[in-house]
Amino acid sequence: MPVVTPDAELLARAVRTFMNADADAGYLEAPGTLAFVATAADKIIGWCWGYRLARPDGASMLYLHQLEVVESHRGQGIGRALTSAFMGAGRSAGATKMFLTTGAENAPARKLYDSLGGGLATQGPTVNYWFLL
């Protein structure tokens, strides 16, 4: 099960698989974007994507926006491999922290993030907001 940084064609296949949409051809060239795709027998079986964000203090951090594995391939270490690749790329680019949001009831994701050394935010209860622009 290779985990790779996708080219435009592989990204297009992943976006079609997991978002049922067409990929933006410029995504891979946009500053700070990170994406990884897992394949098996030329099929897309998982992906993750997000951003390396610059901070005003000169450091940078990662934001993992989406991690998804095809249901029939879950529990096989694919999510771990994708997240590890994402974290490794961010670390190599100078990021020192990573954050993400997952559902409180998403036990498999929380177990994965805990096992990778993640910890719950310590700034107290948080609430997520979405804005349409």
Image (cartoon, grey):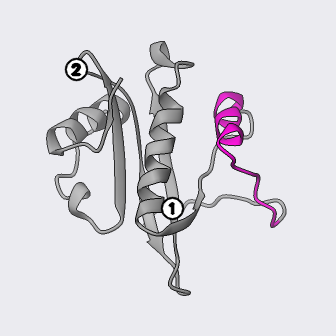
Give the residue displayed 53% in from the left and 25% down from the top: 77
Tally of numbered tags: 2
Residue 130's spot in the image, x, y percent? 56, 59
- Give the numbered dot on residue 101: none
Q: Give the range drawn in magenta.
A: 106-123
Give the residue displayed 43% in from the left and 22% down from the top: 70
Give the residue displayed 36% in from the left and 23% down from the top: 1
Q: What residue type is labelled 1?
A: Leu
Give the residue displayed 53% in from the left and 34% down from the top: 80
Residue 78's spot in the image, x, y percent? 47, 27
**Pointer 2 residue:** 42
Where is the C terminus found, in terms of image quarters? bottom left
Depicted 27 relative to depicted 61: above or below: above
**For the residues marked 2 and 1, what is the alpha-carbon distance in whole angstroms?**
29 Å
Q: Which of 74 and 25 is in front in this view?
A: 74
**Left or right relative to 80: residue 48:** left
Q: Is 116 covered by the magenta stretch?
A: yes
Depicted 62 relative to depicted 117: above or below: below
Q: What residue type is labelled 2?
A: Asp
**Pointer 1 residue:** 62
Q: Residues within 10 Å of mark 1 (few under 14, many from 20)?
A: many
Q: Which of 133 and 105 is in front in this view?
A: 105
Disc 2 is placed on an element classified as loop
Which quarter of the picture shows residue 124? bottom right
Disc 1 is placed on an element classified as strand
Which quarter of the picture shows residue 9? top left
